[in-house]
Image (spheres, helix red, strand yellow):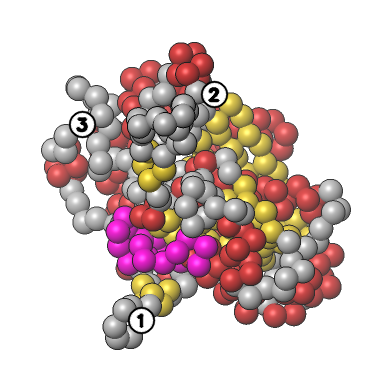
Amino acid sequence: MRVFVCDYIRTPIGRYGGGLSTVRTDDLAALPLRHLAEKHPTIVSKIDEVFVGCANQAGEDNRNVARMATLLAGLPETVPAVTLNRLCASGMDAVVAAFRAICCGEIDIALSGGVESMSRAPFVMPKATAPFSRTNEVHDTTIGWRFVNKKIAEQYGIESMPETGENVAEDFGVSRGDQDRFALASQTGAATAQESGRLAQEIMTVHVPQRRGAPVQVSHDEHLRATTYEQLSALPTPFREGGSVTAGNASGVNDGAAALLIASERAVEAYGMTPLAEITGSASAGVEPRVMGIGPVPAILKLCERLRTTPEGFEVVELNEAFASQAIACCRELGLDPFDEHINPNGGAIALGHPLGMTGARIVGTTCLEINIRKAQSGLVSMCVGVGQGVALSLALPT
C-alpha cells in the first residue's frame, strides 16, 4: 500500500513568551487541523484518524490533546484522535503512525501533526508521600527531567539536554568553532528562506485575540536572530566549564503547531488529491541517554538498510538541530558534510526554534515542499530524542 503526504501547513514558530504564548495548547493544535479541514471539505467526513504528537501533556495539553484539538477544529465527533509522545520526535511519530496504519490497510485518510506551547508549560508538584507531610517540591515541565526514577539516575544519569550536547561534542570531537559556524549557517539559511517567501509557503497566519482591540496577527517565525560568527563565538558556555554548547548553537524553547494530510493511493485517486510526496519508510533506534543527540545515526542506517540505499543517496536532508554539536556529529558519522547546502537548506531548529511536539511534523512537511521545489527524487528526515533515541523517515517525489 503506497502512502502519500497530500498537504501540509503550520503556524509560525513563536518565541518563548512571544506572539503565540497566550494561545492555549489545545487551541494551537486545532489551528492547522482546521486549516486542512476547511481546505479539503470533501474528505473531512472520511478522515479515519487524527494523530498528534505532544511532548509535555502536563497542562492544557492533558487528557489526549489530539482529541481536544480535533473537536476544537470543528471536525465531526465521529473522527477519532490519539496523542503520541516520543518527546522531540512526537510529531514525526504522528506521521509514522499514519503511515503504518495505511500500510496495514486499516485506514485510508489521516491528519497527522504536532503541537507544543513551551511558554505555557506548567509547574507541577507531587502528592504528599506521608500523612500530614509539609514537605513539597515543584518541577518546571518546560523541558527536561522531573519525577526521576532513582534507578534511572543511578544507571544512566539524568544530565540535562545541553549537557548531552556537551557529551556528544566531547565524544565525537566537534569543536566550538564548527558548532558556531553551523549555527550561523542555520540562521543565514532561515533568514534567506524568510526573506524569499519560502517559509511563507508553509505558514498560516494566526489571529491572536487581545483583551482590548483587534486580534494581533502572527505570520512570521519569531525566533530568528541576525548574528555574526564573532557574536556567536563570544557567547558563554553555561552548561559546562570549558564547554562548547551555548544559547547560540542550541535550539530554542518555542511554541507552534503543524499538520499534514496523509492518504492511501486509493484515497488519492478517489478524491482527486495531489500528493506532495510519498512516504517510503521509517525506522527508530536507541542509544545511550547521555549522548541522545547521536540517535539519528543508527535510525538512519537502519532505514537505509531496509531501502537498500545510503545516506548520501538522499537529495534533501532535514536533520533536526537540537544542538549544533549533535547535528554535526550525526552528519559526519553518516558520511555527510554538515555544511552541504542540501542539509537543512532553509535553516533548522537553531534558527527557527524547536517546539518539541511540533518539530517532527514540521520537518517532514518542509521536506515534502523542498523536494518539489528542487524536483529532487528523495528526502530524508531524522531527529534525536531525549533519553536516547533516534527516528528517521524517508520521502520520495510522487511518480
Badge 3 amino acid? Thr
Is residue 141 visible to the viewer in this orientation of the structure? Answer: no
Disc number placed over residue 34 in the picture, else none: none
The residue range painted magenta reads 7-27
User: For the point 63% across and 66% down, which residue is it?
Assistant: 70
Name the residue nearer the viewer: 147 or 118. Answer: 147
The part of the image, by quadrant, that contains residue 324 is: top left
Residue 16 in view (yes/no):
yes
The answer to whether mark 3 and mark 2 are in CB contact below 8 A is no
Q: Which mark is residue 287?
A: 2
Residue at the farthest front position: 132
The residue tagged 3 is 237
Q: Residue 228 location in percent, x, y? A: 18, 48
Whole-angstrom CA distance, mark 2 to mark 1, is 45 Å
Say whether disc 3 or disc 2 marks the residue closer to the N-terminus. 3
Mark 1 belongs to which amino acid? Pro
Residue visible at 43% across and 74% down in the picture: 206
